[in-house]
Amino acid sequence: MMEDAKEKEKKSVKQIYISILALTLMNVSIIAGIGNDVQQAFYGLSAVTYFAIGAICFFIPTALVAAELASGWSNRGGIFRWVGEGLGKGWALTCLLILWFQTMISFGMGKPSYAATIMFYTPMYDKAVQFAQHPQHEVLIMTGFIILYWILTFIATKGVKAFSNVAKYGVLIGTFIPLAIMIILAIVWLCQGHTPAIPMTPKGLIPKWNGMSTLALAAGVFFSYTGIDTNAAHIKQLKHPEKDFTKATFITIILVFLIFVVGTVIIAMVVPENQLNVIYSLNTVFRELGATIGMPWLYMVLVWAGLCNVLANVITNMAGPSFMLGQAGGSGFLPKWFQEKNKHHMPAHLMYTQIAGMTIIAYLVKLIPNVEGFVILLTQTITILYMFYYILMFITFLRLRYDQPNRPRPFKVPGGKVGAWIVAGIGLISSVFGIVLAIYPPAQVKSEVGSPVTYVVIICILVAVILAICFIMSKKHPEWVDPRNKFAPFTWEIEGLNKPGKVSSNVPTEIMSKDQNPMGMPIKRHYSPDEQVSSSVFKAAEDNKLTPPDADN
């Protein structure tokens, strides 16, 4: 009877796929937006060099590693699946929780700044600038934005099709169309005889050395590139997960780099460095460029368009981490209440918990006396945690190259083991570099936080508390296992191992997991750690047409 019920449930659920384009734009919505370019515009043309260094040292290694891991272990779970295969369930859940907390904290800290930009949605530019410099009724306005975020979370609970469409059109309207307009109008602006505010010469590409602040900027650029792996949560919504995720990843690399570089250079050209303002300089650029064609009010149109990108960013981030955590939670890691999914198969309780935490942080940031110090500490804490997350991913990649060398991977980082070590090594060094700089006290630490010792101690305590929560939650509870969950066991579980270890099997993960009981339940069909199958099996597995071969019982 139970088997019949499962079959009926399987047939009743229509598989909904997302396209490579949709996944690419979801990736872009998480990583990039022209609103992120203003901060780097302070560094003029040399920002191009910083973005190139960030892409080479962090973004490309991260994307290459994520592509190989997704192609070899394409079952549900994303980072949880990958790290669990290489390092075990405890570290795997730690990665998911770091991602979940990072999203909640980052969005919470960003809310107050939105309140200062509210007047730019009107054609009254001068009043908008005055309001941004001296905002009023900030808590009330911020509450309006928080309500918007709750609405977006509600939309995200409606399923992958709903939020993938919002993300897709949000990025197109809020990033690519404004960027195209900026490029065209910047050319018109130059043709009209305007002089760029920065020297447009090869010499301008060379960064100026300003001590630790120069290094801190490089680390900040690394952080700008984080998130390429987040949408692996939806890998099973791709028709051909192993190939489609890889294609979307490499298209994302190109688009993100162009958005960062082109947007930053145009902003630096139009607005002099001493007039740059992180909150509203992008609107100044839109106004200045719009004036070239007699439309200074164009900034208002593009601000509304930019809101679409905000919607895409929020809805993708609120869906991805909770979606992955909810999938893993059904294997015995989350209480039943957090596991519950709505009719769209989304973990609504978990998503609303995250948005509630974001709301609390937003009001804390706005209402506590020493807001600057609080934001500095939270920012550096999530930077350390996020870099630690990527350290675990790079270590996992290397571990799987040695522990599961024969496991089929449609995409492999080129260069064999040497290439793997070069790519992962650069990524590891960059991540450690980011952590060291996050711990290093900034210049304003004494006035905002206290002594450097206090600064370091508080950050270490915050990191330790969050990691302790992760480790406590990583303890599995058999009574929390949902026998209906769709989370396949790890390969080392199917092969009868107690923890990740070295195996010589070349059986594709899709074949090993086919028709198995879900994670947390007894393994239905065991495979030998040294089991071998022919190359024809790989082709059939890619086409999803193969039934599992005979395996050891």
Image (cartoon, helix red, strand yellow):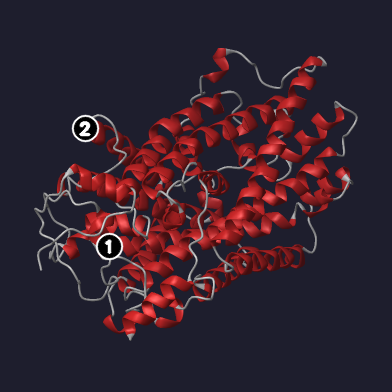
SS of the residue at dot 1? loop
Near-viewer residue (4 or 467): 4
- Look at label 2 and name its amino acid: Gly
- Look at label 1 and name its amino acid: Lys
Near-viewer residue (324 or 446): 324
| Residue 334 at x, y percent in the picture | 38, 76
> What residue sits right under mark 2 in the picture?
416
Tell me if residue 58 comes above or below residue 349 in the rendering. Answer: above
Mark 1: few, some, or many residues within 10 Å (few <14, many ≥20)? Answer: some
Residue at point 87% right, 43% down?
A: 126
Near-viewer residue (243 or 107): 243
Give the mark nearer the N terminus: 1 vs 2: 2
Q: Nearer the viewer, mark 1 or mark 2?
A: 1
SS of the residue at dot 2? helix
Near-viewer residue (170 or 113): 170
Mark 2: few, some, or many residues within 10 Å (few <14, many ≥20)? Answer: few
* Quadrant of the frame with the N terminus: bottom left
Tell me if residue 451 comes above or below residue 363 in the rendering. Answer: above
* Quadrant of the frame with the C terminus: bottom left
User: What is the spatial separation of the Cα atoms under label 1 and label 2, in whole angstroms?
Assistant: 29 Å
Residue 514 numbered mark, or none = 1
Residue at point 54% right, 26% down?
A: 48
